[in-house]
Structure formats: C-alpha cells, structure tokens
Image: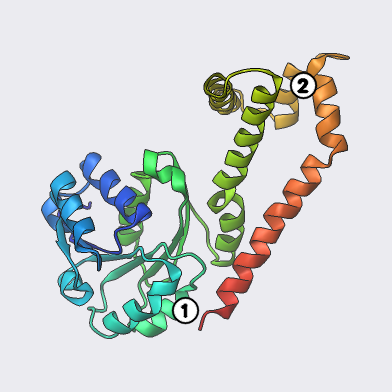
Amino acid sequence: MLQEKKVTFIGSGVMGQAMIAGLIEHDLIAPQNVIASDPIKSLGERLNEQYGVGHSTDNVAASQGADIVILAVKPQYLDPVLAELGGKLPSETLILSIVAGVPIDKISRHLKLETIVRVMPNTPARVGKGMSVWTATDAVNEAQREQVKAILGALGQEIFVEHEYFLDMATALCGSGPAYVFLFIEALIDAGVHMGFSRPIAQELVLQTVEGSVAFARAYPSHPAELRNMVTSPGGTTADALYQLEKGGMRAILSKAVFAAYQKSKALGSSES
C-alpha cells in the first residue's frame, strides 16, 4: 500500500531517522520515493548513503508531488515550516505530524488542509519497539489510515484513538514513559553498585531482569499484582523490599509524576495558536 507512494520527511532528527529506517528496512517503500528535508545538509547526505533516500534543504521543493508529508521537526521550529508550506500542498496530501503538543487544528489552519494525522510516538521506535498513539481527522480516508498503520507498524506497535485529548494522556504515559523506566533502571543499577557489584555487572543484571520481566508479563497476561505475588514469598526478601517501596510512596509518587506530565502536555497544547 506504500510502495508507490511518495513520502517527504520535514525534519531528519532522531524520530525522523527512525521512521525512515523502519520504512526502508521493512521494505515498505522504495528508497527513491522518500525525501528527507532538513536545513542540515549533512544529515540528508548521511541518510542518502545509508538508505538511498533523496534529500533536500528546501521544504517546499521536497514536498512537491508527495502523497504523504511527515512533520518531524521540534515544536519550536514548526511555525516557520507551516508558514513555508501553507497553501502550497494539494488538498489530498496526507499530513502526519509527530510534533509534540501541537494540536491538529493549528496544523490544519496554517496548511489549509483537512487530511491530518497526529501521532505520539516514543523513543524505543529507534529500535523497532516503539509505542505510537494516533488520531486522525474525518477527512482521512480508510486507505490513508491503513498507510498510517503501516508506517507506524514499522516502528513497533500502534494504537488508534478517536479523540485528540487522548494524545495528552499518551504523552504522559508512553511518550515520557521511557524516561521513568530509565530512572528506575538507573536506581536499580546504583543499588547494585552500592552492594558491591561492578557497574557493568550490575547493569547487565538489571537490564536482563527488566527485559525478562516484560517478556514474562506478555507471556502470562495476568494482573500485575498476581505476577508480583508469584515472586513474593511470605516473610521473604522480596516482601521486605516491596514493603519499603510502598512505605516510601513509590506507587503514589509515580501516579503524581504521570499526572504532572499530562497536565503539562495539556498546557502546551492549549498555548498553541
């Protein structure tokens, strides 16, 4: 469904590169049908060497003839891009935005287009293990929705939501989520070093434990409390450790942290005009 489509990336940063890599490596689109547009010429040249895609420093020229234009710039750079492209794209062009915090209405008004998809991806997309949450306007037809699913599927898993406000929740839970996990991993490694392990050994122990725990949770889709009880013997070492975590308010502080991220995401979105 994508092989004959022409796709232009506006922005070739971390997520843009991850998406290009996923599309090419999964053989979803021919390299010659992809253009990466970025003000840093060397980024485009590097992508051309790696994947054979076209590259440009001119957003308008790069977008001409594109079936799908993917907005992959940082939020602070979006306004000039929208000003550049406004009124210069055909009405059937599908716009896919991964720009954090920018509502569909703003993109639609500035580009004078109705076919807009907004996505909240996360950084594990770089290794094909991403979680992308997305929504679309009513103008996006079924064929275009299938194209979006294929693009996001190359990054990991994708979930469609009916309303844009769910993207603020997704930002807090899975967009920022890797940072929470990395902090937890860091704290466990530091605890291992404090006990006497070398840092490389502590890191390997923790990473494999986290990876194995996720795999176990997927293989046995019970409530997390049941899985936790499988590890916890009455009066044992795990019970003592969990008591300290609950006493320290780990569950409550994590909930507060996620809600703070949610409130911030809503505030950023409402400040966009």
Q: Is residue 252 visible?
A: yes
Q: Which mark is residue 95?
A: none
- Image coordinates of residue 155 in percent, x first then y, are 37, 45
Residue at point 37% right, 66% down? 73
Residue 157 makes an appearance in the image: no
Quadrant in the picture for residue 56? bottom left
Q: Position of residue 188 (x, y in %)?
A: 66, 30
> Are the residues flagged by discs 2 and 1 in contact, CB closer than 8 Å?
no
Instruction: Report which residue position mark 1 lands on.
Output: 105
Q: Amino acid at mark 2?
A: Asn
Residue 153 percent location from the top left of the image: 37, 45
Give SS at disc 1. helix
Residue 143 is situated, as x and y percent measured from the top left of the image, at: 30, 59
Identify the residue at horizontal 80%, vertical 47% (top origin): 252
Q: Secondary structure at mark 2?
A: helix
Q: Estimate the spatial distance between the alpha carbons at disc 2 and disc 1, rounded to whole Å.
A: 47 Å
Residue with the mark numbered 2: 229
* Amino acid beneath label 1: Asp
Q: Residues within 10 Å of mark 2 (few under 14, many from 20)?
A: few
